[in-house]
Amino acid sequence: MTFQNSIELLKFHNVAYSIYAFMIISIIAWFGYNLGRKEKAKSIIRIPFYGYIAFLVIGGVGHHIFTYNTIPWVQEDMMKDEIKPDKVFNIEIKDHKWILPKTPMVVNCGKPTLFSVKSGDLMYGFGLFRQDGTMVTQMQVDPGHDNRLMWTFNFPGTFNLTSTEYSGPAQYSEDGKDLLFVKNAVKVVGCKNKKGGN
């Protein structure tokens, strides 16, 4: 199983973590039940308890190892120095304003794209969002550093940009409008799959 977009991954994690949380709650309930009993638990009872704890630890670690191997953008992010991007967009942000190379930034479907973002003053965030407001990807933008995000878009769409870090009241106008919000900042073209996602 390989996840091609973050919505698929979120659905999978919702199920997996719900089951895992129920199992953890059950062990706490079991422990609480045994605390309230008048008779002491026999030592033989402890073996299933510690076995269950070991199962939870192995299951939790195993889940993260499994999802690491099935999420393509994790390896892409860790190996970005060795991957030649199809396109590179150099972006700056200063005084609560984005300085973009162009709008929209057009990227090719299925090809790695590198967003290189520099802050001239504060800590910001670089976040790309679908039209329904759900997040595609994001990174922190530390001042004085070259902050790089490698991402491959596998589905068509137009995505909005905003800061995912609060950078002070100057980020918002008097009527509450996010001044760092850029509508349709990224456009993905050339996809064979017409269904949205990413």
Image (spheres, rainbow, N blue to C red):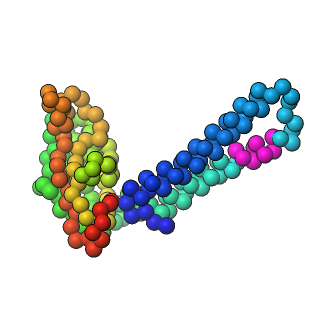
Residue 114 image offset from top left, x and y in percent: 27, 59
Can see residue 151? yes
- Position above or below: 148 against 86: above
For the point 18% across and 31% down, the residue is 176
For the point 48% across and 56% down, the residue is 12
In the rendered structure, the answer to whether residue 172 lies left or right of residue 8 reads left
For the point 28% across and 47% down, the residue is 133
In the rendered structure, the answer to whether residue 50 lies left or right of residue 75 reads right
Q: Quadrant of residue 163?
A: top left
Question: In the image, which residues are magenta?
Answer: 46-53
- Residue 185: say if magenta: no
Residue 62 image offset from top left, x and y in percent: 59, 55
Q: How many marks?
A: 0
Residue 189 image offset from top left, x and y in percent: 21, 67
Residue 115 image offset from top left, x and y in percent: 25, 55
For the point 33% across and 59% down, the residue is 198
In the rendered structure, the answer to whether residue 5 lies left or right of residue 51 reads left
In the rendered structure, the answer to whether residue 146 lies left or right of residue 15 reads left
Can see residue 87? no
The residue lying furthest to the left in this view is: 102
The residue lying furthest to the bottom in this view is: 192
- Position above or below: 118 against 155: above
- Position above or below: 180 against 85: above
- Position above or below: 182 against 84: above
Q: Quadrant of residue 169?
A: top left
Q: What secondary structure predominates along the stretch shown in magenta? A: helix
Q: Nearer the viewer, residue 147 or 32?
A: 32
